[in-house]
């Protein structure tokens, strides 16, 4: 199914042209050296645009962890991201939105439009993003969920509050609401029997 989606994206919708344009813009940024982090992110995004159903965009910090804590580098990255968003990020997102709307207008392009809409965040902030295989992205999501589950267990001390909403983790509230639901069901049955 992914292969069919990639074929539909590249043949009738000319996805390879979009990927080539984003690659050229990224290459231009890399050549300037000052904006190389943006250029590398755009090159990764062009790889995603070539086969959007086979790849996903993830943050590099999800793969490597937060190894880069240099305050000077973070400040430079923040300034670079701000300039990129104002002058190039927003216009590219607007052009992508036009492309997404055109894909939505054709029935066959709806899956492509959904994938493109999910990747708009990467187009707006490409710094630190990496294109990985879909299975790797799924494994990262599972690992992230597992770590959140374990941190929730340590914080709350019980597994009950992880799997249930807060109002169900409180046993007294749970029992009272169950009794209330049972009473309302009995009253409803009694009213229906009275009508008959």
Image (cartoon, helix red, strand yellow):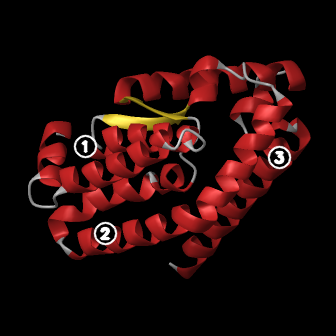
Q: Which residue is mark 3?
A: 167
Rendering quarter of residue 34? top right
Q: Mark 1 packing: few (<14 Cα in 10 Å), some, or many (20+)?
A: many
Q: CA distance from mark 2 to mark 1?
A: 15 Å
What residue would you read off at disc 2? 99
Q: Which mark is residue 50?
A: 1
Please give the name of the residue rendered at 53% of the width and 61% of the height, measured from the top-left corner: 89
- Residue sitting at 88 percent across and 24 percent down? 155
Question: How far from the left and from the top, in percent, is residue 173?
Answer: 87, 46
Q: Is residue 97 above or below residue 3?
A: below
C-alpha separation, residue under disc 3 versus residue under disc 1: 47 Å
Q: Is residue 81 left or right of residue 109?
A: right
Could you tell me how far apart the alpha carbons at marks 2 and 3 are, in whole angstroms?
44 Å
Q: Nearer the viewer, residue 76 or 135?
A: 76
Instruction: Give the image quarter of residue 48.
Output: top left
Image position, residue 145 (x, y; %): 62, 27
The residue lying at 25 percent from left, 43 percent from top is 50
Q: Are marks 2 and 3 in contact (CB under 8 Å)?
A: no
Dot 2: few (<14), some (14–19), or many (≥20) neighbours within 10 Å? some
Q: Nearer the viewer, residue 42 or 144?
A: 42
Please tell me which of labels 2 and 1 falls first in the chain: 1
Where is 195 relative to 122, above or below?
below
State which quarter of the image contains the N terminus: top left
């Amino acid at each position: 199914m992914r292969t069919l989606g990639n074929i539909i994206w590249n043949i009738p919708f000319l996805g390879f042209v979009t990927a080539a344009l984003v690659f050229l813009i990224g290459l231009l940024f890399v050549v300037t050296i000052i904006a190389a982090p943006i250029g590398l992110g755009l090159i990764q995004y062009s790889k995603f645009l070539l086969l959007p159903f086979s790849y996903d965009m993830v943050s590099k910090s999800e793969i490597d962890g937060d190894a880069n804590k240099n305050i000077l580098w973070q400040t430079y990255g923040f300034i670079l991201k701000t300039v990129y968003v104002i002058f190039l990020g927003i216009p590219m997102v607007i052009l992508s939105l036009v492309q997404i709307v055109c894909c939505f207008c054709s029935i066959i392009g709806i899956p492509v439009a959904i994938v493109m809409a999910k990747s708009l965040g990467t187009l707006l902030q490409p710094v630190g993003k990496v294109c990985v295989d879909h299975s790797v992205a799924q494994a990262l999501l599972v690992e992230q969920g597992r770590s959140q589950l374990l941190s929730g267990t340590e914080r709350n001390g019980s597994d009950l509050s992880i799997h249930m909403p807060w109002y169900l983790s409180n046993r007294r509230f749970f029992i009272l609401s169950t009794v209330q639901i049972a009473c309302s069901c009995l009253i409803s049955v009694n009213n229906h029997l009275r009508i008959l």
